[in-house]
Amino acid sequence: MHKPPSIAFAKLSAAPKKGTAVILLGEETAPAASVTPLDPSGTIGRAMAAAKFKGGFGAALDVWAPGGTDFDRFALLGAGKPEKRDETGWMRLGGSAWPLVRKAETVAVILDVADGEPEATAAASFALGLLLRSYVFDKYKSKKDVKGKAREDDNGKPRLSKLTIHCADPSTAKKAYADAEAVLGGVFLARDLVNEPANALGPVEFADRAKELEELGVTVEVLAEKEMKKLGMGALLGVAQGSPRGARLVVMQWNGGKAKDKPIAFVGKGVTFDTGGNSMKPASGMEDMKGDMGGAAAVAGLMHALASRKARANVVGIIGLVENAVDGNAQRPGDIVTSMSGQTIEVLNTDAEGRLVLADALWYCNERFEPAFMVNLATLTGAIMVALGQYHAGLFSNDDDLAGKLLASGTATGEKLWRMPLGTEYDKLIDSKNADMKNIGGRYGGAIIAAQFLQRFVKDTPWAHLDIAGTAMGSPASDTNTSWGSGFGVRLLDRLVRDHCEA
């Protein structure tokens, strides 16, 4: 897992007198009074005037070797208007700071602005954003030494060794950051998993990575094909039958709540590579299908985050891991399989495979754990990207209360959702003449039809489906992420648990 630089917190009065100082300045305001001792000659004000720097959100200005000080550099960072500095805003500011500091060895961040002193939790959000942006996946890049020192690689791997955030209440900030750091570990795990090439991360290897969560106190069970066959998981196993790499179902449990409390459950699609099967995808872009396990990665990352911060809730995470490959034994269009629920499915398109994996995983979760609610995550359809682009994930739910909580959690974390419809008109489109249902509908409403299919496997349990095809992999770069794998869903669901499910 990517290891970020360490962060410390200290009082504003303890700001250093040398090195690099990152100074936050609100929009169209003078430097904060607390900054003045760092700049007795007024270099900052003159630099702002000369550069017409107004402190716009995320804007930056470097002042090298400022006169009258021993500092190497002042890095001015615009904090925008006060109304932009909510939790997500502070996190984005932290991400914006990373390019300013990643090549410096020692950095002090002066977290103060003239139009209002930030709360201690803002410091934790700033730190989280900065470290989220710091992530690089360079596991497979060659490392070379130059005169005994590690060379910074093409991805800009940081050599920052120490960063201190100076704020009004460092003790409270440190406590808030402890939880944020736990979530950061979960996001980095999810990003690592999505970024791994498929030759290195198949179902067995993914299950092994999930097994490592036992070190954090998570109980992990791994079901192999023999156990799944006994359970009647014909839908999931049908997808896997074309690959020599065996399928796995991983069950993770974190028991941090009261024994009497019902668990809550998160289920992830884990297709470690998706050729499309006999309904093969076009060659162009197929390499991206190493990320078709983004839902499973998010669930694993969530369990890491919850265990790391000792969440006071009982949580189940289940991931169905398969490779959808092509050989003489691969599933054919027209095959009929029997799911664990006993419902039969006519497989008209072998590239609509994620819903088959989730059908058995959801049913198993519901039958075994009887959770208070279930949320599944899946890079399920390209259709959701047609509808929403890559800035919102699609939300489908049979429960308005659960949907509302998810939407609020998405807004709070910046991992945004948009609710999509379900209805009997759409459900009829997957009725089959030859089986209980078929795995595709018509040309239109593909994301909705996929959700309707999943709903047939949740009974009356409150349930939500998050289609994260546009947000989990290959999503646009942002202030807090430049990685191909984004780790989308970990922070969102951690917030859901924190705000609504902990004792």
Image: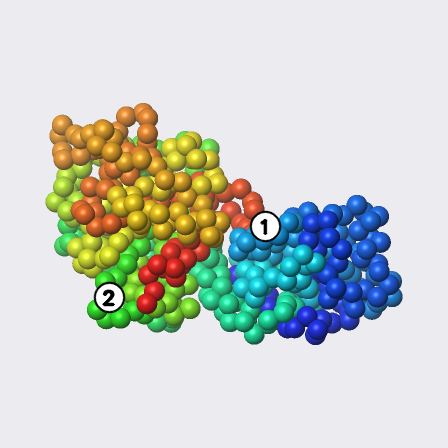
Task: Tell which of 203 and 112 is nearer to you.
Answer: 112
- Residue 389 visible in the picture: yes
- The vertical placement of 40 against 193, above or below, is below
Residue furthest out toward the top: 443
Residue drawn at point x = 80 percent, y = 51 percent: 48
Task: List x then y, in percent, for residue 201.
Answer: 40, 54
Tell me the residue that label 2 is attached to: 261
Residue drawn at point x = 35 percent, y = 42 percent: 395
Residue type, numbered disc 1: Glu
Secondary-structure class at tag 2: loop
Residue type, numbered disc 2: Asp
Q: Is residue 128 left or right of residue 328?
A: right
- The vertical placement of 336 against 127, above or below, is above
Task: Tell which of 130 and 89 is nearer to you.
Answer: 89
Residue drawn at point x = 37 percent, y = 67 percent: 311
Tell me the residue that label 1 is attached to: 83
Task: List x then y, in percent, for residue 100.
Answer: 69, 56
Q: Count neighbours of disc 1 (C-alpha within 10 A) and say few if under 14, some if 14 to 19, many if 20 or more.
A: few
Q: Count neighbours of disc 2 (C-alpha within 10 A) and say few if under 14, some if 14 to 19, many if 20 or more.
A: few
Q: Is residue 448 left or right of residue 201?
A: left
Residue furthest out toward the front: 115
